[in-house]
């Protein structure tokens, strides 16, 4: 029984590894197919595991790309979309996987991948022979050895999972530890590390581009604004020309703010934005934000109220905390209802401070909530277009840079509430819990 269990588990594990290799290869291949000037092309930049043969077929049946001479062995086999199929060709056993139709802009492709099962079959054959020859004296030893081998074989997989989780959190410098043996798992590890390195390089190039472009745009935008302001002060401008100049000035201001926020985010991602931490009174910060946003809120007849104990303090970068709250209040002003109300609240609990910005505006659809902190995301194309789409991204970075978290709660037609959990608060007197305070 022990050998049967070991044999079955080993066979299943090897089978699953082959399937994972084929499925992962299809993901890698499909990600490299795109249409340029009306023609499909395969970039072939990310390496595919060398033991995998494959070809790509366009929707009209023509072959776009192929790799490996052995893939031609399966030309007579019809496509079985999404099904793992075992075939025998030239005395070798193969596993093939055909993709479902994959949409590429206005067309679609299908991918067939194939991998030999010879190594797995050979390993299982050896196991059977060992059992038949040595079962009486080695039954107990085989059971104990199977347990040890299973744990050792799963250790690299656990290492891959741990590394993948750290990479998923944004650390692209993380690499998967190399596998102890140069088998399929070792080759998969090498392939994944190469892919991550390529992604990291592309991400760094994107960061440098955003930073360089923002720097280069600051001067021409400032010049345009200066000339527009000079035109605005001309006394002989017609009403139509004056309106055009005002539009130019407004767009210049929007562009300058976009540039500053892009610089903030790129410097933050590159670790070049130092925090100047100091002890701040939350009530004073709220009052400053209320004063700064009073004129903008007054244009829509919206009231801003603040509720924070005078003895509530927090350690933070004052300019960034103020910018965070202004971004959230400005968002509430844009999407709140005229004659509406915006409430800033704060309370303390052991080890952290809770802050909220609440409005009674249009609300956000539940399907859009997971995306509102993404750059340039707009939940509703019909909404006010004066913003640049980076305010909430900057707000999220500010909170995370201080070790906190930010969440949103919204109901269509009733309003939106941004909830901030800020660490390291200073509480000089006893307070209510965050949930009670913020909902009050």
Image (cartoon, rainbow, N blue to C red):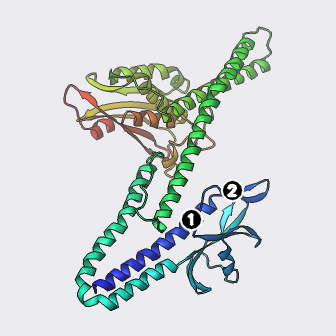
Quarter of the rendering occupied by the N terminus? bottom left
Identify the residue position indicated by label 1 in the image: 49
Identify the residue position indicated by label 2 in the image: 43
CA separation, marks 2 and 1? 16 Å
Quarter of the rendering occupied by the C terminus? top left
Label 1 near label 2: C-beta < 8 Å?
no
Badge 2 density bin: few <14, some 14–19, many ≥20, Cα 10 Å:
few
Q: Quadrant of residue 72?
A: bottom right
Closer to us: 32 or 51: 51
Please indicate, yes or no, whether residue 48 appears anywhere in the rendered image. yes
Left or right: where 41 falls relative to 340: right
Give the numbered dot on residue 337: none
Closer to us: 396 or 208: 208
Q: Residue at position x 67%, y 20% from top? A: 219
Question: Which element type, helix, strand or loop, lies under badge 1?
Answer: loop
Residue 226, image x, y percentages: 69, 15
Going from N to C along the chain, the mark reached first, 2 or 1, is: 2
The correct choice, above or below, for 54 with respect to 106 in the image is: below
Please indicate, yes or no, whether residue 388 appears anywhere in the rendered image. no
Residue 211, image x, y percentages: 59, 31
The correct choice, above or below, for 397 with respect to 55 in the image is: above
The correct choice, above or below, for 108 with respect to 302 in the image is: below
């Amino acid at each position: 029984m022990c050998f049967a269990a070991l044999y079955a588990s080993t066979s299943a594990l090897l089978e699953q590894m082959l399937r994972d290799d084929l499925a992962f290869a299809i993901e890698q291949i499909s990600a490299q197919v795109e249409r340029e000037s009306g023609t499909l092309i395969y970039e072939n930049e990310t390496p595919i595991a060398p033991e995998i043969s494959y070809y790509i077929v366009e929707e009209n049946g023509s072959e776009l790309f192929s790799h490996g001479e052995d893939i031609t062995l399966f030309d007579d086999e019809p496509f079985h979309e999404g099904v793992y199929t075992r075939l025998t060709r030239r005395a070798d056993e193969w596993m093939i996987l055909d993709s479902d139709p994959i949409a590429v802009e206005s067309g679609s492709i299908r991918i067939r991948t194939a991998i030999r099962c010879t190594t797995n079959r050979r390993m299982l054959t050896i196991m059977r022979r060992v059992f038949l020859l040595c079962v009486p004296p080695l039954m107990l030893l085989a059971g104990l050895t199977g347990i040890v081998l299973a744990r050792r074989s799963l250790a690299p997989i656990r290492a891959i999972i741990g590394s993948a989780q750290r990479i998923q959190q944004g650390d692209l410098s993380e690499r998967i530890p190399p596998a102890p043996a140069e088998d399929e798992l070792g080759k998969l590890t090498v392939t994944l590390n190469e892919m991550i390195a390529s992604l990291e390089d592309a991400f760094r190039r994107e960061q440098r581009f955003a930073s360089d472009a923002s720097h280069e745009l600051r001067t021409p935008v400032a010049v345009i604004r200066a000339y527009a302001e000079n035109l605005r002060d001309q006394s002989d401008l017609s009403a139509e020309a004056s309106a055009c100049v005002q539009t130019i000035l407004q767009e210049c201001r929007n562009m300058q703010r976009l540039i500053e926020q892009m610089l903030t985010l790129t410097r933050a991602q590159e670790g070049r934005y130092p925090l100047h931490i100091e002890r701040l009174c939350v009530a004073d910060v709220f009052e400053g934000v209320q004063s700064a946003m009073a004129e903008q809120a007054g244009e829509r007849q919206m009231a801003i109220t603040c509720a924070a104990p005078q003895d509530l303090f927090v350690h933070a970068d004052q300019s960034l905390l103020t910018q965070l709250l202004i971004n959230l209040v400005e968002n509430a002003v844009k999407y709140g209802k005229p004659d509406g109300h915006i409430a800033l609240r704060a309370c303390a609990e052991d080890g952290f401070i809770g802050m909220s910005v609440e409005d009674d505006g249009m609300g956000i659809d539940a399907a859009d909530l997971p995306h509102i902190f993404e750059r340039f995301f707009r939940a509703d194309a019909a909404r006010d277009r004066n913003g640049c789409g980076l305010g909430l991204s900057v707000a999220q970075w500010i909170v995370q840079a201080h070790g906190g978290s930010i969440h949103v709660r919204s109901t269509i037609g009733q309003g939106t509430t941004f909830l901030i959990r800020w660490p390291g608060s200073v509480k000089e007197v006893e307070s209510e819990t965050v949930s009670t305070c913020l909902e009050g």
